[in-house]
Image (tube, grey):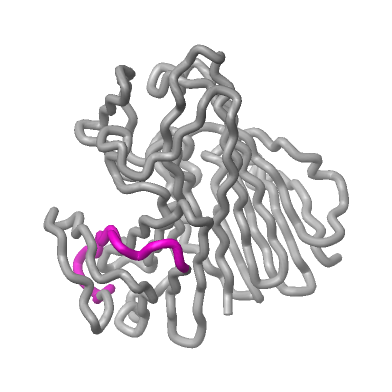
Amino acid sequence: MHGMFTVTTREGTLETVELRDEQSRSMARLSPSRGGLVTRLSLLGNHLFFLDESTLRDTAKNVRGGNPVLFPSPGKLEGDAWSYQGKKGSLKQHGFARNLPWEVASDVTAPQKDDARVTLRLVSNDETRAAFPWDFRADYTYILKGNVFRIEQRFENTTSAHSTPMPFGAGFHPYFHVRQADKAGTKIGSPAKRAFDNVTKKTVDVPDSGIDLTQAEVDLHLEDHGEGPCTLVLPGRTITLRGSPDFTRWVVWTVAGKDFVCVEPWTCPGNALNSGKSLMTLAPGQSKTVFVEYQAG
C-alpha cells in the first residue's frame, strides 16, 4: 500500500482527493472545489494542520485552516487595486486562487509506485481576466512520501503573443496546529533580523530571543530571511519548511486564543503588483516551476 492514493466524496458535497502513504502513516486530504485546498496533513502519524470545519463547509467564507493557495498576489494590495505597466485591476487579499474551484488534472485511478501524488489545475476564465487580464495555467502537483509533503507549482502564461509579460507572486498560508498552551514553548527558526510588523505598521528588529507567539496578534513579515529553510519548533517535534529560491518572503501570523501558528512562504511581499518588488514575470508562452515542501521530524 506504500504510496497509494484514492479519491472519495466526503459529506456528500465536497469532492476529496486523499493521498496516503500507509507505511509512513502519512496522509494529505485536498478539496479541489474549495480553492484546491489541502485541508488535512498528517506526517508520521502527527496531524500538522489546524482547520475550522465550519469555514470549510460555508462556501461564502474564506477557509480558516489547512494550506490556502496564494496566487497571483500574496498579501494585501493597497486599496485592493493594482497597476502594472499600463494595466490595472482589483484583487482581494491573497488573490483569487483560494476562492475558485480547481480541477483534478492527473489520473487519480492509476496506482503510484514511488509516492502518492495528484495534480490540481486552475485555468484563467472570464472571472480571473476581469481582475487580472492575462491567460494562464497553474498546475499544482501535491506529492506525499514518507515524512515529506512537496508542492510543485508550474505557471504558464498562455496569453496571445502580443501581450505584455504576466507579473505574479505565489505563496501558501499553512495553518499549523499549535495549541494556545504550547505557543510559549514554540519557536520560529529563521536567520531574519528585520521584519515588517503588520500590526503596528512599522519595521522592527526580530528579537534575539525569538518571536513571542503568545502576543494578542503576531503578524511579522520577515524581510531578510533569504532562501534557506524556516522551522517551526514545537514541544517534541520540528516542522521544516523549504522552498525554491524564489521563496524569500516568510510571514509569521497567529492570534491569541486560536490553536494555530501560520508560517507562510511567499515569493514576494504584499502589494508587489504595485511596487514591482520580487515579482516573477512570464512572457507569452513561457512557464516557470517552483516548489515548497513541509517535512516532519
Specify whether residue 219 is painted magenta: yes
Q: Split into 4 quadrants, where in the image is the C terminus?
A: bottom right
- The percent position of residue 193, horizontal first and vertical second, equals 25, 71
76 or 153, which is in the foreground? Answer: 153
270 or 96, which is in the foreground? Answer: 270
Is residue 170 depicted above or below 81 in this figure? below
The stretch in magenta equals 212-228
Q: Is residue 200 visible?
A: yes
* Residue 248 location, quadrant: bottom left
Q: Is residue 59 visible?
A: no
Residue under the image location 52 percent in, 39 percent down: 35
Residue under the image location 28 percent in, 28 percent down: 82
- The percent position of residue 280, horizontal first and vertical second, equals 44, 39
Position of residue 112 in the picture relative to residue 297 (left or right): right
160 or 55, which is in the foreground? Answer: 160
- The percent position of residue 260, horizontal first and vertical second, equals 39, 66
Return the residue found at the far bottom.
236
Residue under the image location 46 percent in, 51 percent down: 246
